[in-house]
Amino acid sequence: MSFHEMWAELLPVGRSAASGGYRRFAWTGADTDCRAWFRQQAEGRGLAYEVDRNGNQWAWQGDPAAGDAVVTGSHLDSVPDGGAFDGPLGVVSAFAALDALRERGARFTRPVGIVNFGDEEGARFGLACVGSRLTAGAVTPEQAHRLTDADGVTLRRAMEAAGHDPDAIGPDPERLARIGAFVELHVEQGRALDLSGDRVGVASAIWPHGRWRFDFRGEANHAGTTALADRRDPMLPYAETVLAARREARLAGAVATFGKIGVEPNGVNAVPSLVRGWLDSRAPGQDGLDAVVTGIEKAAREHAAAHGVDLDVVRESFTPVVEFDHALRDELVRLLGGAAERSVPVLGTGAGHDAGILAGRVPTAMLFVRNPTGVSHSPAEHAAEDDCLAGVDALTDALEGLACT
Ligand code: HGY
Ligand code: MN
Ligand code: MN
């Protein structure tokens, strides 16, 4: 099955007719359909297929027990109304690259694995990269079992409903010990390649980034009869904090986003009792990120106090800066540059990835494919087919150089 055919087959899975975006949330029906697609692609190629203790899917060319495997792949889940490329491009390209290696008659000297990491976006349970974090021991089973979705469904119950044993989850050092290199191909979530005129680039680093929940607690009251002076309205300090976030981020050359909000009781004619806002912030370095979040929290506490509102701030997720393995990065630059030693762009990113989680445990690298608008986490996310095929070629060259004679 060609890249184009795989792409066309996966395209409608979990896509909203209303928005054109994807709603492939962990352990839902759409996720199950994506997983079935992955298994079909694996078994259709005669690859050994398995699901690990954390629900990640693996397809193997060769015996992983031999160790020093080269693994590629990404994720198939999405953010709410996300785009078609974030995640799936890496998985489809992985199967296409393996097909290309077989067509080249490549002789494998190392096992080659293709992986679909579960719940990378954290869209349903709020923690990103759950599948890879559990495997790397970056989150404990106890922490994971405490995760609940907006309807109060726990990760445990969601896994059970999808047929996965929630008591099996946990670190998987043996599996990671068998991986000699992990290379994730991903659509670029920015415009660096568009600006440089390159189809494919190699990642240098991932910015430190995290998610914080701000709970502003005021006093519910009647919107029509409560004098302004008598209100303890949490929406006001929330709004002022959103503006403070933009100011702090701009001062630090960072980014800060309040993209998700929960309001109780959420009535048009009711002053809210609670406004819950989630901050996503990222910066080129840890000091900058610390300065931004500290500044935002300070402003939030000042505004909350001014309105007689209580505030709790909870850090829900954090990933320190990731420097990808220099030797593997440089090897990819050499392999992609080819005999002509073409220059290959090396670029950083503010986007988190499973590769960022594994980087602490196995030599890890990323390839980026040009995104002409840079737009991501949106139905408008797009990459040209020629660029996608150039990404497959680059991944094929990388895998051949790493895992074949
Ligand atoms: O949030 C991120 O950067 C990634 O898409 N999970
Ligand atoms: Mn994403
Ligand atoms: Mn992604």
Image: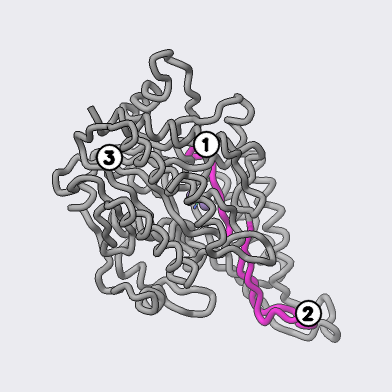
Tell me: residue 188, above or below residue 210: above
The magenta segment: 258-287
Q: Nearer the viewer, mark 2 or mark 3?
A: 3
Could you tell me which residue is drawn at 33 percent across and 48 percent down?
114
Which residue is identified by label 2? 268
Q: CA distance from mark 1 to mark 2?
A: 44 Å
Residue 277 is inside the magenta segment = yes
Looking at the picture, how far across and down is residue 165, in whole percent?
29, 74
Crowd class of label 2 (few under 14; some 14 to 19; many from 20; radius 10 Å): few
Looking at the picture, how far across and down is residue 209, in whole percent?
49, 48
Q: Secondary structure at mark 1?
A: strand
Which residue is identified by label 1? 369
Q: What's under tag 2, amino acid-wise?
A: Val
Q: Quadrant of the C terminus?
A: top left
* Res. 58 visible in picture: yes
Q: CA distance from mark 2 to mark 3?
A: 55 Å
Res. 228 image quadrant: bottom right
Which residue is identified by label 3? 70
Looking at the picture, how far across and down is residue 73, in whole percent?
38, 47
